[in-house]
Amino acid sequence: MAAEFAGSATLFVAGIAARLKGPVLWCLNRRDLFAPSLAGAGLHPDRVIYAEAFRERDILPSMEEGLRKKGLAAVIGEVTRLGLTSSRRLQLAAESSGVTALALRRWRTVAEKEQTHLPTAATTRWRISPCMSQALPAPGLGPSRWHIELLRCRGAEPRSWILEACDAKGRLALPADLADRPDQAQIRRSATR
């Protein structure tokens, strides 16, 4: 994720972890998490165990070790490189313990961005980006919205949604102005007849 999308993806992952029961291990090598924002997405900072690595190559082993502990709700790792072998190791560790594994792909350079397209053993692959908020009748900011894309999922087709950002309990919502409009697929079918 690029710097401009980092906040959206981080809060999306925090919202997922917030809905799970138990402590969350967050493996990172940059001190840029903002605990009040995590709490705003439903993940209270008291539930988060931070594992800070000085080198990025130490994050994946930390994640794998955390995934072997059955008492955790989730293990989240912020990584640039995630190859097929290392992602398969994470997947096997998560399957054996039942702990949810979430990898945030972070990149700063074009060369690092190109590595995000390499294959992994991840069950799903998502892209989260900010989306324009609904205009309010009065000046100000509306609720945050995200463009959520399911890029890869075993046995399913790619899809995308526009959703309101996680609330204080980690729940996502369909924006009211989008929920109340007619079914676009049905309108397209009737227009072609």
Image (spheres, grey):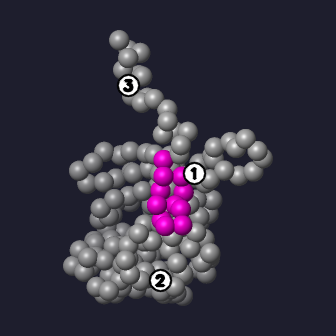
* Numbered circle sitting on residue 186: 3
Q: Could you classify mark 2 by the number of other residues whose Cα lies within 10 Å: few (under 14), some (14-19), or many (20 or more)?
A: some
Residue 177: x %, y % from top left: 55, 39
The quadrant where residue 86 appears: bottom left
User: Which region is colored magenta?
Assistant: 164-174
Viewer-side residue, 4 vs 50: 50
Separation of disc 1 and disc 3 at Cα?
A: 25 Å
Separation of disc 3 and disc 2 at Cα?
A: 45 Å
Secondary structure of the residue carrying tag 2 is helix
Query: For the residue marked with disc 3, what is the amino acid?
Result: Gln
- As for residue 101 lying within the magenta part, the answer is no
* Residue ranking furthest to the right: 139
Q: Point out the image quarter for the C terminus.
A: top left
Secondary structure of the residue carrying tag 3 is helix
Instruction: Kindly tell me whether residue 35 is visible in this rendering.
Output: yes
- Of labels 3 and 2, earlier in sequence is 2
Disc 2 target residue: 47
Q: Could you classify mark 3 by the number of other residues whose Cα lies within 10 Å: few (under 14), some (14-19), or many (20 or more)?
A: few
Separation of disc 1 and disc 2 at Cα?
A: 25 Å
* Numbered circle sitting on residue 145: 1
Residue 170: x %, y % from top left: 48, 65
| Residue name at image x 39 percent, y 51 percent | 150
* Residue ranking furthest to the top: 193
| Residue name at image x 35 percent, y 83 percent | 72
Query: For the residue marked with disc 2, what is the amino acid?
Result: Arg
Secondary structure of the residue carrying tag 1 is strand
Query: For the residue marked with disc 1, what is the amino acid?
Result: Arg
- Of labels 1 and 3, earlier in sequence is 1
- In the image, residue 133 above or below residue 54: above
Residue 183: x %, y % from top left: 42, 30
Count of numbered tags = 3
